[in-house]
Amino acid sequence: MIAQDVFMIAMSLMDETSSDGTFAGYDDDYKKKAWPILTVLQTELLPLSVSPVTITDENSTLLVDDRVGNTVLPYGLAAHLLLSGNVQSASFFNDRYEELKRRRKAVIAPITDVYGVNETD
C-alpha cells in the first residue's frame, strides 16, 4: 500500500471529493501536510522492532499492513488535516482512529527473564 491510497481514503472520509471523484480544490494544501503526518502515524502503529521510514510523497510505500492502512491510518490522517479547520470533525476522526488503533491484533512475543527471577538452582 502506498501513501496515496491512504490519502484518497482520508479525502473521501472528509467529504473532500466532488461527484466525479476528484478532489474539491484542497488537494495540494492537504498533500503538503499529509506526508509528514503519515510518517508520524505509521511510526506510532509499527512494532518497536520495525524501523520507521519517512513518507516523502504519494508513492512512498507504507510499512503497516493493508488492513491498518485501509482502516486506521485514514482516520488519523483526516483528524490531523482537519485540526485547524473543523474541530468537531477532527475530534470525531481522532476518536475513531484511537478506537481502531486499540482493536489491532496484539503481537505475542516471549518474555526474556533478564533478572534471573525464574531461574532454578
Image (cartoon, helix red, strand yellow):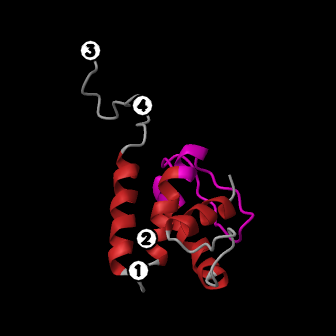
Q: Residue furthest right?
A: 59
Q: Residues within 10 Å of mark 2 (few under 14, many from 20)?
A: many
Q: If you read the primary sequence from the N terminus, does the residue marked by circle 4 or circle 3 appear first?
A: 4
Q: Nearer the viewer, mark 1 or mark 3?
A: 1
Q: Which residue is mark 3?
A: 120
Image mark for residue 108: 4
What's the amino acid at mark 1? Leu
Q: Which residue is mark 1?
A: 83
Residue at 63% in and 74% down: 18
- Dominant secondary-structure state across the stretch colored magenta: loop
Q: Nearer the viewer, mark 4 or mark 3?
A: 4
Percent across and percent down for residue 107 are 44, 35
Image mark for residue 79: 2
Q: Read off the magenta span.
A: 42-70
What's the amino acid at mark 2? Ala
Element under label 4?
loop
